[in-house]
Image: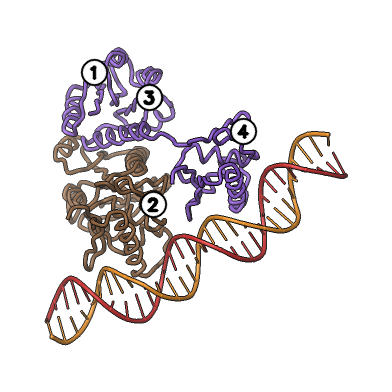
Chain colours: A purple, B brown, C orange, D red
Amino acid sequence: MSKVLIVEDEPKLAELMAAYLEQAGYEHHHIDRGDQVIDYLKNNQADLMLLDLMLPGLDGVEVCKQVRQFSGMPIIMVTAKAEEIDRLIGLEMGADDYVCKPFSPREIVARVKANLRRVELDQTEAPKTDGFDLDADRLRATYKGELIDLTTVEFQLLQLLIKEPGRVFGRDMIMKSIYTDSRVVSDRTIDSHIKKLRKKIAAVAPELNVIHSVYGAGYRFENND
Amino acid sequence: MSKVLIVEDEPKLAELMAAYLEQAGYEHHHIDRGDQVIDYLKNNQADLMLLDLMLPGLDGVEVCKQVRQFSGMPIIMVTAKAEEIDRLIGLEMGADDYVCKPFSPREIVARVKANLRRVELDQTEAPKTDGFDLDADRLRATYKGELIDLTTVEFQLLQLLIKEPGRVFGRDMIMKSIYTDSRVVSDRTIDSHIKKLRKKIAAVAPELNVIHSVYGAGYRFENND
DNA sequence: TACCTAGGTGAGCAAATAATGAGGATCAAC
DNA sequence: GTTGATCCTCATTATTTGCTCACCTAGGTA
Protein backbone atom coordinates (compact mmCIF):
# COMPACT_ATOMS: atom_id res chain seq x y z
CA MET A 1 0.00 0.00 0.00
CA SER A 2 1.23 3.50 -0.79
CA LYS A 3 2.53 5.86 1.82
CA VAL A 4 1.79 9.58 1.88
CA LEU A 5 3.97 12.14 3.61
CA ILE A 6 1.96 15.06 5.02
CA VAL A 7 3.93 18.25 5.57
CA GLU A 8 1.63 20.69 7.33
CA ASP A 9 2.05 22.92 10.36
CA GLU A 10 -1.58 23.25 11.31
CA PRO A 11 -2.29 20.21 13.49
CA LYS A 12 -6.02 20.03 12.89
CA LEU A 13 -5.68 20.13 9.16
CA ALA A 14 -2.98 17.48 9.22
CA GLU A 15 -5.19 15.29 11.34
CA LEU A 16 -8.09 15.67 8.98
CA MET A 17 -5.95 14.73 5.98
CA ALA A 18 -4.52 11.77 7.81
CA ALA A 19 -7.94 10.49 8.77
CA TYR A 20 -9.23 10.54 5.24
CA LEU A 21 -6.14 9.06 3.71
CA GLU A 22 -6.31 6.26 6.20
CA GLN A 23 -9.91 5.60 5.33
CA ALA A 24 -8.90 5.39 1.70
CA GLY A 25 -6.34 2.80 2.58
CA TYR A 26 -3.14 4.81 2.53
CA GLU A 27 -0.35 4.84 5.05
CA HIS A 28 0.81 8.26 6.19
CA HIS A 29 3.39 10.14 8.19
CA HIS A 30 3.15 13.68 9.46
CA ILE A 31 5.87 16.34 9.65
CA ASP A 32 5.18 19.89 10.80
CA ARG A 33 8.38 21.66 9.83
CA GLY A 34 9.85 22.22 6.39
CA ASP A 35 13.44 21.68 7.46
CA GLN A 36 12.83 18.12 8.58
CA VAL A 37 11.52 16.81 5.26
CA ILE A 38 14.78 16.12 3.49
CA ASP A 39 16.16 14.28 6.46
CA TYR A 40 13.04 12.17 6.75
CA LEU A 41 13.03 11.25 3.08
CA LYS A 42 16.69 10.26 3.19
CA ASN A 43 15.88 7.67 5.79
CA ASN A 44 12.32 6.66 5.04
CA GLN A 45 10.24 5.57 2.12
CA ALA A 46 7.28 7.63 0.88
CA ASP A 47 5.35 7.48 -2.38
CA LEU A 48 3.78 10.91 -2.45
CA MET A 49 4.05 14.19 -0.56
CA LEU A 50 1.34 16.65 0.40
CA LEU A 51 3.28 19.85 0.94
CA ASP A 52 1.96 23.01 2.54
CA LEU A 53 3.34 26.23 1.09
CA MET A 54 3.73 28.18 4.34
CA LEU A 55 5.87 26.26 6.74
CA PRO A 56 8.08 26.97 9.71
CA GLY A 57 11.71 26.06 9.24
CA LEU A 58 11.84 25.98 5.48
CA ASP A 59 9.24 27.21 3.03
CA GLY A 60 7.34 24.83 0.76
CA VAL A 61 8.82 26.06 -2.50
CA GLU A 62 12.32 25.48 -1.20
CA VAL A 63 11.46 22.05 0.16
CA CYS A 64 10.02 21.09 -3.19
CA LYS A 65 13.11 22.17 -5.09
CA GLN A 66 15.42 20.30 -2.77
CA VAL A 67 13.39 17.10 -2.90
CA ARG A 68 13.36 17.27 -6.67
CA GLN A 69 17.12 17.04 -6.72
CA PHE A 70 17.01 13.44 -5.67
CA SER A 71 13.44 12.25 -6.11
CA GLY A 72 10.76 12.18 -8.76
CA MET A 73 7.98 11.37 -6.30
CA PRO A 74 4.65 13.11 -6.89
CA ILE A 75 4.36 16.33 -4.90
CA ILE A 76 1.03 18.04 -4.33
CA MET A 77 1.33 21.62 -3.14
CA VAL A 78 -1.28 22.93 -0.72
CA THR A 79 -1.83 26.68 -0.63
CA ALA A 80 -4.19 29.01 1.18
CA LYS A 81 -4.88 31.23 -1.81
CA ALA A 82 -6.23 30.14 -5.13
CA GLU A 83 -4.62 33.10 -6.88
CA GLU A 84 -1.25 31.82 -5.79
CA ILE A 85 -1.57 28.77 -7.96
CA ASP A 86 -0.79 30.48 -11.22
CA ARG A 87 2.26 32.10 -9.69
CA LEU A 88 3.43 28.77 -8.29
CA ILE A 89 3.03 27.02 -11.61
CA GLY A 90 5.15 29.78 -13.08
CA LEU A 91 7.94 29.04 -10.62
CA GLU A 92 8.44 25.61 -12.11
CA MET A 93 9.63 24.15 -8.90
CA GLY A 94 8.55 20.71 -10.06
CA ALA A 95 5.33 20.09 -8.18
CA ASP A 96 2.85 17.79 -9.89
CA ASP A 97 -0.40 19.23 -8.67
CA TYR A 98 -1.90 22.03 -6.63
CA VAL A 99 -4.76 22.20 -4.15
CA CYS A 100 -6.01 25.24 -2.31
CA LYS A 101 -7.55 25.55 1.12
CA PRO A 102 -10.22 25.10 2.11
CA PHE A 103 -10.50 21.78 0.41
CA SER A 104 -12.76 18.86 0.95
CA PRO A 105 -11.31 15.53 2.04
CA ARG A 106 -12.83 14.09 -1.12
CA GLU A 107 -10.65 16.31 -3.21
CA ILE A 108 -7.45 15.48 -1.42
CA VAL A 109 -8.01 11.78 -1.67
CA ALA A 110 -8.96 12.05 -5.33
CA ARG A 111 -5.79 13.94 -6.15
CA VAL A 112 -3.57 11.62 -4.20
CA LYS A 113 -5.11 8.70 -6.02
CA ALA A 114 -4.79 10.31 -9.44
CA ASN A 115 -1.17 11.23 -8.95
CA LEU A 116 -0.19 7.85 -7.60
CA ARG A 117 -1.86 6.11 -10.46
CA ARG A 118 0.16 8.15 -12.89
CA VAL A 119 3.49 6.99 -11.54
CA GLU A 120 2.31 3.41 -11.32
CA LEU A 121 1.36 3.54 -14.94
CA ASP A 122 4.71 5.04 -15.89
CA GLN A 123 6.50 2.22 -14.20
CA THR A 124 4.56 -0.65 -15.66
CA GLU A 125 4.78 0.63 -19.20
CA ALA A 126 7.95 -0.65 -20.73
CA PRO A 127 8.11 0.57 -24.30
CA LYS A 128 8.38 -2.32 -26.71
CA THR A 129 10.46 -1.54 -29.72
CA ASP A 130 12.00 -4.96 -30.16
CA GLY A 131 14.77 -4.89 -32.66
CA PHE A 132 14.48 -1.31 -33.76
CA ASP A 133 17.36 0.97 -33.02
CA LEU A 134 17.44 4.64 -33.88
CA ASP A 135 20.54 6.77 -33.66
CA ALA A 136 19.44 10.39 -33.78
CA ASP A 137 22.98 11.75 -34.11
CA ARG A 138 23.71 9.77 -37.22
CA LEU A 139 20.18 9.67 -38.53
CA ARG A 140 20.61 5.94 -38.82
CA ALA A 141 17.93 3.37 -38.18
CA THR A 142 18.44 -0.38 -37.96
CA TYR A 143 16.23 -3.40 -37.42
CA LYS A 144 18.08 -6.31 -35.84
CA GLY A 145 21.31 -4.85 -37.07
CA GLU A 146 20.16 -4.35 -40.62
CA LEU A 147 20.22 -0.84 -41.92
CA ILE A 148 16.99 0.88 -42.95
CA ASP A 149 18.00 3.66 -45.29
CA LEU A 150 15.73 6.55 -44.38
CA THR A 151 15.58 10.17 -45.43
CA THR A 152 15.47 12.91 -42.81
CA VAL A 153 11.72 13.27 -42.73
CA GLU A 154 11.17 9.54 -42.69
CA PHE A 155 13.61 9.18 -39.82
CA GLN A 156 11.94 11.90 -37.79
CA LEU A 157 8.58 10.33 -38.42
CA LEU A 158 9.68 6.92 -37.27
CA GLN A 159 11.43 8.42 -34.30
CA LEU A 160 8.31 10.25 -33.22
CA LEU A 161 6.07 7.23 -33.51
CA ILE A 162 8.46 4.81 -31.91
CA LYS A 163 9.07 7.04 -28.93
CA GLU A 164 5.65 6.14 -27.58
CA PRO A 165 4.60 2.80 -29.00
CA GLY A 166 0.87 2.35 -29.00
CA ARG A 167 0.09 6.02 -28.84
CA VAL A 168 -1.89 7.47 -31.71
CA PHE A 169 -0.35 10.52 -33.36
CA GLY A 170 -2.64 12.74 -35.36
CA ARG A 171 -1.39 14.25 -38.58
CA ASP A 172 -1.48 17.71 -37.05
CA MET A 173 0.73 16.64 -34.23
CA ILE A 174 3.10 14.90 -36.57
CA MET A 175 3.43 18.03 -38.65
CA LYS A 176 4.02 20.23 -35.64
CA SER A 177 6.63 17.84 -34.48
CA ILE A 178 8.51 17.52 -37.74
CA TYR A 179 8.22 21.08 -38.97
CA THR A 180 9.21 23.24 -36.07
CA ASP A 181 8.67 26.31 -38.18
CA SER A 182 5.00 27.09 -38.71
CA ARG A 183 5.00 25.63 -42.16
CA VAL A 184 1.78 24.15 -43.40
CA VAL A 185 1.73 21.06 -45.55
CA SER A 186 -1.03 18.90 -46.84
CA ASP A 187 -2.31 15.98 -44.82
CA ARG A 188 -1.55 13.73 -47.77
CA THR A 189 2.11 14.56 -47.35
CA ILE A 190 2.18 12.64 -44.12
CA ASP A 191 0.47 9.71 -45.81
CA SER A 192 3.08 9.82 -48.49
CA HIS A 193 5.94 9.61 -46.02
CA ILE A 194 4.19 6.86 -44.12
CA LYS A 195 3.90 4.91 -47.28
CA LYS A 196 7.61 5.21 -48.03
CA LEU A 197 8.50 4.39 -44.47
CA ARG A 198 6.37 1.25 -44.56
CA LYS A 199 7.97 0.23 -47.82
CA LYS A 200 11.48 0.65 -46.50
CA ILE A 201 10.72 -1.24 -43.31
CA ALA A 202 9.11 -3.99 -45.32
CA ALA A 203 12.24 -4.24 -47.43
CA VAL A 204 14.19 -5.19 -44.32
CA ALA A 205 11.50 -7.15 -42.50
CA PRO A 206 8.65 -8.18 -44.79
CA GLU A 207 6.82 -10.10 -42.11
CA LEU A 208 6.58 -7.05 -39.91
CA ASN A 209 3.63 -4.72 -39.78
CA VAL A 210 4.44 -2.06 -37.27
CA ILE A 211 2.95 1.15 -38.59
CA HIS A 212 -0.78 1.03 -38.18
CA SER A 213 -3.23 3.62 -39.37
CA VAL A 214 -6.07 4.53 -37.06
CA TYR A 215 -9.05 5.64 -39.04
CA GLY A 216 -10.01 9.21 -38.30
CA ALA A 217 -7.17 9.71 -35.86
CA GLY A 218 -3.70 9.17 -37.23
CA TYR A 219 -0.92 6.61 -37.07
CA ARG A 220 0.56 4.39 -34.42
CA PHE A 221 3.67 2.27 -34.03
CA GLU A 222 3.18 -1.18 -32.59
CA ASN A 223 5.21 -4.33 -32.86
CA ASN A 224 3.07 -7.08 -31.40
CA ASP A 225 0.17 -8.56 -33.25
CA MET B 1 -13.57 22.90 -24.63
CA SER B 2 -15.00 22.39 -21.16
CA LYS B 3 -18.42 23.58 -20.14
CA VAL B 4 -19.23 25.12 -16.76
CA LEU B 5 -22.70 25.19 -15.28
CA ILE B 6 -23.30 28.28 -13.14
CA VAL B 7 -26.07 27.97 -10.58
CA GLU B 8 -26.56 31.38 -9.00
CA ASP B 9 -29.63 33.48 -8.30
CA GLU B 10 -27.98 36.87 -8.23
CA PRO B 11 -27.91 37.94 -11.88
CA LYS B 12 -25.00 40.33 -11.64
CA LEU B 13 -22.79 37.80 -9.97
CA ALA B 14 -23.68 35.16 -12.49
CA GLU B 15 -22.88 37.53 -15.29
CA LEU B 16 -19.53 38.35 -13.81
CA MET B 17 -18.63 34.70 -13.47
CA ALA B 18 -19.75 34.00 -16.99
CA ALA B 19 -17.68 36.84 -18.40
CA TYR B 20 -14.50 35.68 -16.77
CA LEU B 21 -15.02 32.06 -17.62
CA GLU B 22 -15.60 33.01 -21.20
CA GLN B 23 -12.42 35.00 -21.28
CA ALA B 24 -10.60 31.95 -19.97
CA GLY B 25 -11.99 29.95 -22.83
CA TYR B 26 -14.76 28.01 -21.13
CA GLU B 27 -18.27 27.49 -22.30
CA HIS B 28 -20.97 28.17 -19.73
CA HIS B 29 -24.64 27.94 -19.00
CA HIS B 30 -26.56 29.78 -16.31
CA ILE B 31 -29.41 28.55 -14.14
CA ASP B 32 -30.93 30.68 -11.37
CA ARG B 33 -32.99 28.14 -9.52
CA GLY B 34 -31.90 25.08 -7.62
CA ASP B 35 -34.79 22.92 -8.72
CA GLN B 36 -33.91 23.16 -12.39
CA VAL B 37 -30.41 21.77 -12.11
CA ILE B 38 -31.19 18.08 -12.15
CA ASP B 39 -33.43 18.41 -15.14
CA TYR B 40 -30.79 20.36 -17.02
CA LEU B 41 -28.06 17.87 -16.28
CA LYS B 42 -30.24 14.98 -17.39
CA ASN B 43 -30.47 16.48 -20.81
CA ASN B 44 -27.24 18.37 -21.25
CA GLN B 45 -23.59 17.82 -20.83
CA ALA B 46 -21.52 19.86 -18.36
CA ASP B 47 -18.02 19.31 -17.04
CA LEU B 48 -18.13 21.31 -13.82
CA MET B 49 -20.69 23.09 -11.65
CA LEU B 50 -20.36 26.33 -9.71
CA LEU B 51 -23.12 26.03 -7.13
CA ASP B 52 -24.39 28.80 -4.89
CA LEU B 53 -25.47 27.69 -1.42
CA MET B 54 -28.55 29.90 -1.06
CA LEU B 55 -30.90 29.29 -3.92
CA PRO B 56 -34.59 29.64 -4.64
CA GLY B 57 -36.39 26.42 -5.42
CA LEU B 58 -33.94 24.00 -3.89
CA ASP B 59 -31.02 24.73 -1.62
CA GLY B 60 -27.43 24.15 -2.73
CA VAL B 61 -26.68 21.36 -0.31
CA GLU B 62 -29.66 19.41 -1.52
CA VAL B 63 -28.82 20.00 -5.19
CA CYS B 64 -25.32 18.79 -4.55
CA LYS B 65 -26.49 15.60 -2.90
CA GLN B 66 -28.92 14.84 -5.68
CA VAL B 67 -26.40 15.44 -8.42
CA ARG B 68 -23.96 13.17 -6.65
CA GLN B 69 -26.39 10.32 -7.00
CA PHE B 70 -25.74 10.09 -10.69
CA SER B 71 -22.67 12.18 -11.45
CA GLY B 72 -19.11 12.52 -10.27
CA MET B 73 -18.60 15.89 -11.93
CA PRO B 74 -16.55 18.46 -10.00
CA ILE B 75 -18.76 20.71 -7.90
CA ILE B 76 -17.51 23.98 -6.44
CA MET B 77 -19.72 25.41 -3.70
CA VAL B 78 -20.05 29.16 -3.44
CA THR B 79 -21.05 30.57 -0.06
CA ALA B 80 -21.50 34.02 1.41
CA LYS B 81 -19.88 33.26 4.73
CA ALA B 82 -16.38 31.95 5.24
CA GLU B 83 -17.33 30.42 8.59
CA GLU B 84 -19.88 28.25 6.86
CA ILE B 85 -17.25 26.35 5.01
CA ASP B 86 -16.15 24.17 7.89
CA ARG B 87 -19.73 23.23 8.57
CA LEU B 88 -20.26 22.40 4.92
CA ILE B 89 -17.19 20.23 4.72
CA GLY B 90 -18.56 18.40 7.74
CA LEU B 91 -21.78 17.67 5.89
CA GLU B 92 -19.92 15.64 3.32
CA MET B 93 -22.36 16.30 0.62
CA GLY B 94 -19.73 15.52 -1.93
CA ALA B 95 -18.57 18.92 -3.13
CA ASP B 96 -15.00 19.11 -4.40
CA ASP B 97 -14.10 22.65 -3.51
CA TYR B 98 -15.39 25.74 -1.72
CA VAL B 99 -15.18 29.44 -2.46
CA CYS B 100 -16.62 32.27 -0.39
CA LYS B 101 -18.01 35.59 -1.47
CA PRO B 102 -16.74 38.09 -2.17
CA PHE B 103 -14.29 36.39 -4.46
CA SER B 104 -12.10 37.68 -7.20
CA PRO B 105 -12.91 36.49 -10.71
CA ARG B 106 -9.32 35.38 -10.92
CA GLU B 107 -9.86 33.06 -8.02
CA ILE B 108 -12.93 31.48 -9.52
CA VAL B 109 -11.16 30.82 -12.78
CA ALA B 110 -8.16 29.38 -10.97
CA ARG B 111 -10.31 26.96 -9.03
CA VAL B 112 -12.29 25.93 -12.04
CA LYS B 113 -9.08 25.29 -13.88
CA ALA B 114 -7.58 23.29 -11.03
CA ASN B 115 -10.64 21.11 -10.62
CA LEU B 116 -10.97 20.43 -14.30
CA ARG B 117 -7.33 19.49 -14.50
CA ARG B 118 -7.91 16.82 -11.94
CA VAL B 119 -10.66 15.10 -13.86
CA GLU B 120 -8.69 15.37 -17.07
CA LEU B 121 -5.90 13.55 -15.33
CA ASP B 122 -8.35 10.94 -14.18
CA GLN B 123 -9.72 10.48 -17.65
CA THR B 124 -6.61 10.26 -19.76
CA GLU B 125 -5.22 7.80 -17.33
CA ALA B 126 -7.21 4.75 -17.99
CA PRO B 127 -10.27 4.68 -15.81
CA LYS B 128 -10.86 1.10 -14.80
CA THR B 129 -14.32 -0.25 -14.34
CA ASP B 130 -14.33 -3.94 -13.51
CA GLY B 131 -11.96 -5.15 -16.13
CA PHE B 132 -12.70 -2.48 -18.69
CA ASP B 133 -9.87 -0.17 -19.50
CA LEU B 134 -10.16 2.82 -21.81
CA ASP B 135 -7.14 4.74 -22.94
CA ALA B 136 -7.98 7.94 -24.77
CA ASP B 137 -4.42 8.53 -26.00
CA ARG B 138 -4.29 5.17 -27.63
CA LEU B 139 -7.92 5.14 -28.64
CA ARG B 140 -7.92 1.68 -27.28
CA ALA B 141 -10.32 -0.26 -25.14
CA THR B 142 -9.58 -3.55 -23.44
CA TYR B 143 -11.48 -5.96 -21.26
CA LYS B 144 -9.22 -7.94 -18.94
CA GLY B 145 -6.35 -7.23 -21.24
CA GLU B 146 -8.10 -8.30 -24.40
CA LEU B 147 -8.44 -5.72 -27.10
CA ILE B 148 -11.85 -4.49 -28.16
CA ASP B 149 -11.40 -2.98 -31.57
CA LEU B 150 -13.68 0.05 -31.67
CA THR B 151 -14.26 2.84 -34.14
CA THR B 152 -14.10 6.44 -33.02
CA VAL B 153 -17.79 6.86 -32.38
CA GLU B 154 -18.06 3.53 -30.62
CA PHE B 155 -15.15 4.44 -28.41
CA GLN B 156 -16.63 7.80 -27.50
CA LEU B 157 -19.92 6.18 -26.75
CA LEU B 158 -18.43 3.59 -24.44
CA GLN B 159 -16.28 6.22 -22.81
CA LEU B 160 -19.27 8.39 -22.08
CA LEU B 161 -21.33 5.57 -20.60
CA ILE B 162 -18.52 4.06 -18.61
CA LYS B 163 -17.50 7.37 -17.08
CA GLU B 164 -20.52 7.19 -14.84
CA PRO B 165 -21.62 3.59 -14.44
CA GLY B 166 -25.25 3.27 -13.55
CA ARG B 167 -26.22 6.65 -14.88
CA VAL B 168 -28.79 6.69 -17.65
CA PHE B 169 -27.83 8.69 -20.72
CA GLY B 170 -30.65 9.81 -22.98
CA ARG B 171 -30.13 9.71 -26.73
CA ASP B 172 -30.22 13.50 -26.94
CA MET B 173 -27.50 13.78 -24.40
CA ILE B 174 -25.40 11.16 -26.11
CA MET B 175 -25.68 13.01 -29.38
CA LYS B 176 -24.78 16.33 -27.79
CA SER B 177 -21.81 14.73 -26.22
CA ILE B 178 -20.51 12.94 -29.30
CA TYR B 179 -21.27 15.59 -31.88
CA THR B 180 -19.92 18.81 -30.50
CA ASP B 181 -21.13 20.60 -33.57
CA SER B 182 -24.88 21.02 -33.61
CA ARG B 183 -25.37 18.20 -36.03
CA VAL B 184 -28.63 16.32 -35.87
CA VAL B 185 -28.85 12.61 -36.46
CA SER B 186 -31.61 10.11 -36.14
CA ASP B 187 -32.29 8.34 -32.86
CA ARG B 188 -31.79 5.05 -34.67
CA THR B 189 -28.21 6.03 -35.29
CA ILE B 190 -27.43 5.79 -31.62
CA ASP B 191 -29.17 2.43 -31.48
CA SER B 192 -27.07 1.32 -34.37
CA HIS B 193 -23.84 2.22 -32.64
CA ILE B 194 -25.01 0.63 -29.43
CA LYS B 195 -25.69 -2.52 -31.33
CA LYS B 196 -22.21 -2.62 -32.79
CA LEU B 197 -20.69 -1.82 -29.45
CA ARG B 198 -22.57 -4.65 -27.78
CA LYS B 199 -21.52 -7.01 -30.51
CA LYS B 200 -17.86 -6.13 -30.18
CA ILE B 201 -17.94 -6.42 -26.42
CA ALA B 202 -19.69 -9.76 -26.72
CA ALA B 203 -16.94 -10.97 -29.03
CA VAL B 204 -14.47 -10.53 -26.20
CA ALA B 205 -16.69 -11.42 -23.26
CA PRO B 206 -19.82 -13.29 -24.33
CA GLU B 207 -21.04 -13.82 -20.79
CA LEU B 208 -21.06 -10.11 -20.13
CA ASN B 209 -24.07 -7.86 -20.49
CA VAL B 210 -22.98 -4.38 -19.57
CA ILE B 211 -24.89 -2.04 -21.84
CA HIS B 212 -28.46 -1.94 -20.69
CA SER B 213 -31.27 -0.10 -22.38
CA VAL B 214 -33.68 1.76 -20.18
CA TYR B 215 -37.08 1.84 -21.75
CA GLY B 216 -38.15 5.36 -22.60
CA ALA B 217 -34.98 6.90 -21.23
CA GLY B 218 -31.77 5.78 -22.86
CA TYR B 219 -28.79 3.57 -22.12
CA ARG B 220 -26.74 2.71 -19.09
CA PHE B 221 -23.46 0.95 -18.43
CA GLU B 222 -23.46 -1.49 -15.56
CA ASN B 223 -21.36 -4.52 -14.88
CA ASN B 224 -23.19 -6.26 -12.05
CA ASP B 225 -26.31 -8.19 -12.86
C1' DT C 1 -56.08 -9.19 -25.93
C1' DA C 2 -55.15 -5.37 -28.81
C1' DC C 3 -52.83 -1.39 -29.42
C1' DC C 4 -49.19 1.91 -29.31
C1' DT C 5 -44.64 3.29 -28.66
C1' DA C 6 -39.80 2.25 -28.05
C1' DG C 7 -35.89 -0.50 -29.08
C1' DG C 8 -33.28 -4.07 -32.17
C1' DT C 9 -31.60 -5.40 -36.57
C1' DG C 10 -29.64 -5.93 -41.27
C1' DA C 11 -28.94 -4.02 -45.71
C1' DG C 12 -27.49 -0.48 -48.42
C1' DC C 13 -26.04 4.00 -49.51
C1' DA C 14 -23.35 8.17 -48.54
C1' DA C 15 -19.59 10.40 -46.57
C1' DA C 16 -15.18 10.47 -44.66
C1' DT C 17 -10.72 8.96 -44.71
C1' DA C 18 -6.60 6.42 -46.32
C1' DA C 19 -3.50 4.36 -49.92
C1' DT C 20 -1.39 4.99 -54.07
C1' DG C 21 1.07 6.64 -58.19
C1' DA C 22 2.69 10.21 -61.00
C1' DG C 23 4.65 14.48 -61.49
C1' DG C 24 6.24 19.05 -60.16
C1' DA C 25 8.88 21.89 -56.72
C1' DT C 26 12.75 22.40 -53.88
C1' DC C 27 17.28 22.03 -52.28
C1' DA C 28 22.07 20.90 -51.85
C1' DA C 29 26.28 19.37 -53.96
C1' DC C 30 28.97 19.83 -57.51
C1' DG D 1 23.38 26.12 -63.85
C1' DT D 2 22.89 20.89 -63.79
C1' DT D 3 21.83 16.89 -61.48
C1' DG D 4 19.89 13.76 -58.35
C1' DA D 5 17.68 13.07 -54.20
C1' DT D 6 14.12 14.41 -51.40
C1' DC D 7 9.91 16.44 -50.43
C1' DC D 8 5.35 17.91 -51.41
C1' DT D 9 0.88 17.99 -53.95
C1' DC D 10 -2.82 16.43 -56.52
C1' DA D 11 -5.96 13.28 -58.63
C1' DT D 12 -7.67 8.67 -58.43
C1' DT D 13 -8.91 4.53 -56.28
C1' DA D 14 -9.86 1.71 -52.36
C1' DT D 15 -11.45 1.18 -47.81
C1' DT D 16 -13.72 2.14 -43.65
C1' DT D 17 -17.12 4.15 -41.12
C1' DG D 18 -21.44 6.42 -40.26
C1' DC D 19 -26.23 7.12 -41.09
C1' DT D 20 -30.81 5.97 -42.41
C1' DC D 21 -34.54 3.24 -43.80
C1' DA D 22 -37.77 -0.38 -43.48
C1' DC D 23 -39.20 -3.91 -40.93
C1' DC D 24 -39.28 -6.62 -36.86
C1' DT D 25 -39.58 -7.55 -31.81
C1' DA D 26 -40.50 -6.31 -27.09
C1' DG D 27 -42.40 -3.50 -23.38
C1' DG D 28 -46.06 -0.94 -21.54
C1' DT D 29 -51.00 -0.03 -21.04
C1' DA D 30 -56.04 0.17 -21.34
Specify whether residue B185 is in view. Answer: yes
Q: Residue at x 58, y 30 (%)?
A: A135
For label 1, the crowd category at 10 Å Cα-Cα, with few meaning under 14, some 14 to 19 and many 20 or more, is: some
Q: Which mark is residue A140?
A: 4
Instruction: Identify the residue under disc 1.
Output: A31
Q: Nearer the viewer, residue B44 or A153?
A: A153
Which element type, helix, strand or loop, lies under badge 2?
strand
CA gap, disc 2 and disc 1:
42 Å
Q: Is residue A99 above or below residue D25?
A: above
Which secondary structure, mark 3? Answer: loop
Q: Answer few, some or many: residues within 10 Å of disc 3's Cα (few below 14, many 20 plus, some between 14 and 19).
A: some
Residue matched to label 2: B27
**What subunit carries mark 2?**
B
Answer with mark 4 or mark 3, whichever residue precedes in sequence. Answer: 3
Q: Read off the residue under disc 3.
A: A72
Do dots 4 and 1 share one subunit? yes
Give me the residue at 27% from left, 39% from top: B99
